[in-house]
Image (cartoon, grey):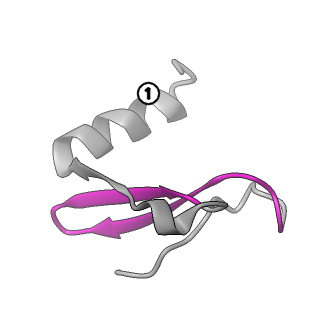
Amino acid sequence: MSDWHTSNYSPNGSSCVEVRERAEGADVRDSQHREAGHLTFAGMEWAAFLRDVKADRL
């Protein structure tokens, strides 16, 4: 599971983020500026973020 991907809800060519999920957590980067690097989130942080998104708290 090391491939970068965007949300299934993101239309092609849109400005969004890409995610690379890993056993230790996830990396997130800007799809328009990939060369700028990425942010890394620990597993517990990423899981909490996903829970909040799914619960519509963000």
Q: Position of residue 3 (x, y in %)?
A: 44, 81
Looking at the image, is 2 positioned above or below residue 30? below
Question: Residue 8 appears in which quarter of the rendering?
Answer: bottom right
Read off the magenta span: 13-30
Q: How many numbered marks, from 0 up?
A: 1
Which amino acid, by three-letter code, is at mark 1? Asp
* Drawn side of residue 12 relative to residue 55, left or right: right
Q: Quadrant of residue 26?
A: bottom left
Mark 1 residue crowding within 10 angstroms, few (<14) / some (14–19) / many (20+): few
The majority secondary structure of the magenta stretch comes to: strand
Q: Which residue does the numbered mark 1 point to in the structure image?
A: 52
Q: Is residue 53 above or below residue 27?
A: above
Q: Position of residue 7 (x, y in %)?
A: 64, 59
Horizontal relation, residue 39 to residue 14: left or right: left
Image quarter in which the C terminus is found: top right
Query: As rendered, which of 10 and 56 lies closer to the eye?
Result: 10
Q: Is residue 17 magenta?
A: yes
Residue occupying image coordinates x 81% and y 57%: 14
Residue at point 62% right, 62% down? 31
Q: In this image, 23 relative to 50: left or right?
A: left
Residue at (30, 34) in percent of width and height:
48
Q: Secondary structure at mark 1?
A: helix
The picture places residue 9, in percent across and down from the top left corner, at 75, 55
Question: Where is residue 21 drawn, in percent x and y?
Answer: 35, 66
Is 5 within the magenta? no
